Image (tube, rainbow, N blue to C red):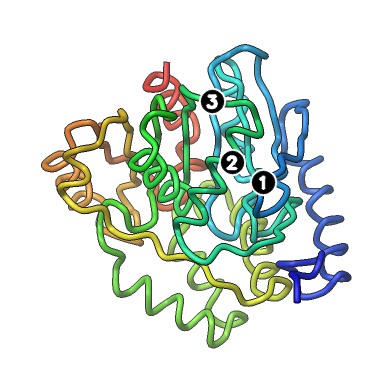
Amino acid sequence: MGVPDFYPYRSAADKEEYLAHYDALAAKQWPLDSDTRRARTSQGSTFVRISGPPGAPPLVLLPGTGATSLMWAQNVAALSGEFRTYAVDQLGELGRSTCQQPFQNLGDQMAWLDELFTALELHNGVNLVGMSYGGALAAQYALRHPERVKKAVLLAPAATVYRLNLEFALRMVLVVISADRYLPRLANWMFADAARVDPQWLQETMVELFINMRKLQPRKTPIPPVVKDAEWAGLRVPMLFLVGEHETIYPAEKAVRRMRRVAPMVTSEVVPGAGHDLHVVQAALINRRMVEFLR
């Protein structure tokens, strides 16, 4: 039996209701006139927002789990000044991508990215930026396919650079038990700086997280590993690793110290006044550092 055409939503009605919400959110949040495209891969059709000058160096933006291409609303204008940006709705998550073959492991996701870049006619010299889970995917792809990647930026990548905190794991378990009770607590803990400087962003993010819990089917999300020392030592792609000083998924300073010790191709920095919301609460700083590095 094949995957229903509303996957990963629980029903066709849930999909229709969310996409109406998503389109209204895009009209409100997305700062640029952008082309949109559906890129066909063997796993499904990937929805991509394309901005920036044609012919400029390509830059693919990978969102975190539970997020869509709209996650980059506060970054895409700065990045699109010098790059041709491709903001992706990941398969099997919220958004307008259509998943026909759910991912079973990281190998499936690497194959999807490989096919996606080819479908977008991005052959070699691709720049990657990934946030959280998207950062983990960017790192894995650069390690496995260095011939196709020019540079990569990892914003607080899930695992990858350091093992996840036990407190984070326990809070996630509590959210599964009771989202109504524990999801707001998780969001306020992870995004404490946004709660202070941009409460509207936090509220909109909370809505998306609740929708994710209520409208998406339970699905297998491959867990990214912590990359081994020897793998980092053999990395051939220049990378920038940025993590907020108040990061909650792992200790920022320890992660940076480890990367400076084992990963000569990675520039690692702690971003002040931010946690897992660094791309929002320190958007100007993050945008500047990304452009400088990728340039």
Front-most of 128 and 140?
A: 140
In three-dimensional space, the C-alpha distance between marks 3 and 2, rounded to whole angstroms, equals 10 Å
Q: Position of residue 51 (x, y in %)?
A: 68, 25
Q: Quadrant of the C terminus?
A: top left
Residue at image point 11% right, 41% down: 261
Lower position in the chain sequence, tag 1 or tag 2: 1
Q: Quadrant of the N terminus?
A: bottom right
Residue at image point 61% right, 54% down: 67
Label 1 close to label 2 by CB (< 8 Å): yes
Quadrant housing residue 11: bottom right
Left or right position of 20 against 225: right
Instruction: Estimate how packed mark 3 is, as few (under 14), some (14 to 19) or many (20 or more) residues with alpha carbons within 10 Å.
Output: some
Label 1 close to label 3 by CB (< 8 Å): no
Q: Amino acid at mark 3?
A: His
Residue at image point 27% right, 31% down: 236
Would you place residue 135 above or below residue 30 in this image? Answer: below
Instruction: Estimate how packed mark 2 is, as few (under 14), some (14 to 19) or many (20 or more) residues with alpha carbons within 10 Å.
Output: some
Look at mark 2 in the image and give the residue it sits on. Answer: 115
Left or right position of 136 against 66: left
Look at mark 3 in the image and give the residue it sits on. Answer: 123
Front-most of 231 and 111?
A: 111
Q: Amino acid at mark 1?
A: Thr
Q: Which mark is residue 41?
A: 1
Lower position in the chain sequence, tag 1 or tag 3: 1
Instruction: Estimate how packed mark 1 is, as few (under 14), some (14 to 19) or many (20 or more) residues with alpha carbons within 10 Å.
Output: many
Q: Which mark is residue 55?
A: none
In three-dimensional space, the C-alpha distance between marks 1 and 2, rounded to whole angstroms, equals 6 Å
Q: Position of residue 204 (x, y in %)?
A: 67, 56
Q: Position of residue 70 (x, y in %)?
A: 66, 44
In three-dimensional space, the C-alpha distance between marks 1 and 3, rounded to whole angstroms, equals 15 Å
